[in-house]
Structures are given as C-alpha cells and as structure tokens.
Amino acid sequence: MIGGICPTCGLPKELCICEEVAKEQQRINVKVNKRRYGKEVTVIEGLDPTDIDLEDLSKFMKGKLACGGTVKGNSIELQGNHRDRVKELLSLKGYSTENIS
C-alpha cells in the first residue's frame, strides 16, 4: 500500500479524515496582547498540537499575513494585530467560524 493506514481512524492515509474532524471540534481563541514598547502580538490559542501541525499552520499564517511569529506551547504568536484576518484565514483552512472567538 502506498500511504499506509492511519492509526487513529483506521482508514488509508489518502482517505483519512482525522484532521478535518479535529478542526471542527476545536474551540479557538484569538486575542491581541500588548508587549514591551507598545508592540502588539496576536495569540491563537486552543489548538491541539496532537491533531494539527502547528508549525505548518504558523508558516501558512506568517506567509499570508507577511509577519513574523512563533509557536509557543499550544499557541501561535504572530507579530502585530491580525485578529480579523486570522479568523478569515482559519476559516479558509477549514476551521468552523462558530468555534473561533
């Protein structure tokens, strides 16, 4: 078999729906914090790193928003105030808009 079998759902890797199910179930909190010297940081919390690749999502966000950022623990931090645009990008990636606050 080319892709193998997903250990979570038991389906072939090509048909695996684990990540889509995880996206629908997560409650994501997007907030803006102020740091030193008045700098703003957008923090995305509530993502489960076992179901979703945070590094990949962070790289996607940083590329689309043209900003720097990092993954710290279970959250993604982006430089600047991107609260509204982050919500749009998360919905484009398949996250439920009702679960994003």
Image: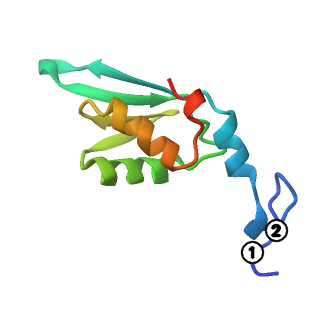
Residue 10 rendering spot, x and y as whole percentages: 88, 59
- Which residue appears at 64% of the width and 32% of the height? 26
Label 1: which residue? 3
Q: Nearer the viewer, residue 60 or 50?
A: 60
Q: Please provide percent x and percent y for residue 37.
A: 11, 20
- Report if the CB atoms under discs 2 and 1 are less than 8 Å apart: yes
Label 2 sits on what residue type?
Pro
Q: Quadrant of the N terminus?
A: bottom right
Residue type, label 1: Gly
Q: Residue 35: x, y in percent?
A: 22, 20
Q: Secondary structure at mark 1?
A: loop
Circle 2 is placed at which residue position?
12
As drawn, 85 above or below 3: above
Q: Is residue 40 above or below residue 57?
A: above
Q: Which of disc 1 and disc 2 is earlier in sequence?
A: 1
Q: Secondary structure at mark 2?
A: loop
- Identified at 55% across, 34% down, the residue is 97
Position of 12 with respect to 58 (left or right) is right
